[in-house]
Amino acid sequence: MKLLLRYLKDQMPLITVGILCNIIIISVLLLFEIPLDIILYPLAICDVLVISYGLNRFYQMKTRFTSLTAITHPEVTDISRYPAMITCMEQEEFRIIASLTDQIRTLQDSNEKAVRDMIDYYTVWVHQIKTPIAAMKLHLQNEDTRFSRSLQTDLFHIEQYVEMVLAYLRLSSSQTDYRFAQYDIDEILRKVIRKSADEFIERKLTLHYKPVGIRAITDAKWLGFVFEQVLSNALKYTPSGSISIYASDADTICIKDTGIGILEEDLPRIFENGFTGYNGRLSPQASGLGLSLCQKICHNLNHEIHASSTVGEGTIISISLRQHDNLTTL
């Protein structure tokens, strides 16, 4: 019914002209004293033909509209499914659409190739840069001084930044290496905690970790990256005190710190790409990418991530491993 009303609205100028023509013809013929029944008979035949033509055009428009609605889906790019053209204007529109579609496909192929090449390059670069990092770590293992521990912490941060670059590139790609299975979340957490152990010692921060006892369907590597980024942020913005890792319920992991906290007006935007807020101005090395990547990864893993904070008291990042309805098709 809505489509019919839209069609009638589009044809309103033609309908108005038709009604005026009927009125003019009847009026003129009546002036010549021609009987009304003789006038109405041919007019009725003409009106029936016009209405029939209009209904046929509406049926054709409805069919084309249904076809157009089907091919406007983002995943449908087959121009051959475009409905049959009738008028010369429609044929010209189809020619333009076909030309633009070819250009879009060419650009998409070019962009996808550029992204693949960039990912391949940085993947090789990451593996290459890890070699000297591993070598420096090996050299530092033979020393146990405050300076060597500080260098180990810096190397760990370099590794995190390298992994962040790789994660950012992979998330920008249409193909990401997710491997879903049921994992023991404590095993993932322990690996992340061990990586940060030296920084806890160097910073003299206390870790309160209570095994969460949760098993969940996830990707261990990507969820570990999320835990690592959140823990890194907690360490970065906690000058003294402690960091706690615990389960708030049967499927939610919380990482809580006693750091500087987040301003109330910044809190709604901390997961935005590139947003650093007031805390970012205090820390020049802040990129605003970490939490943004965490949110994207959690979305793709079918998890959720939330934050709550009080300035001067600390921040709590909650990661819900509950299965939601946003699982990305891979």
Image (cartoon, grey):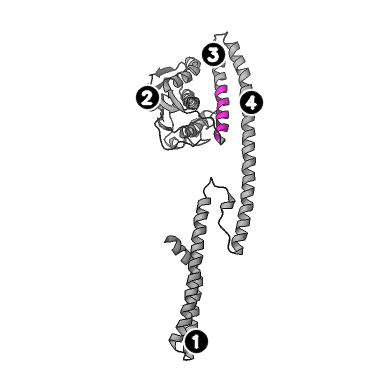
- Is label 1 in a helix, a strand or a loop? helix
Residue where numbered disc 1 is placed: 28
Kind of residue at badge 4 = Trp
Residue where numbered disc 3 is placed: 149
Q: Residues within 10 Å of mark 3 (few under 14, many from 20)?
A: some
On screen, residue 8 versus residue 118, left or right, reads left
- Spatial CA distance of label 2 from label 1 is 89 Å
Kind of residue at badge 2 = Ala
On screen, residue 87 versus residue 183, left or right, reads right
Q: Residues within 10 Å of mark 2 (few under 14, many from 20)?
A: some
Height in image: 135 above or below 266? above
Judge depth for marks 4 and 3 and give the one in front.
4
Height in image: 116 above or below 98? above
Q: Residues within 10 Å of mark 1 (few under 14, many from 20)?
A: few
Q: Main secondary structure of the magenta part?
A: helix
Q: Which residues are magenta?
A: 158-171
Give me the disc on residue 307.
Answer: none
Please tell me whether residue 136 belongs to the stretch shown in magenta.
no
Please tell me whether residue 160 belongs to the stretch shown in magenta.
yes
Residue where numbered disc 2 is placed: 247
Residue where numbered disc 4 is placed: 125
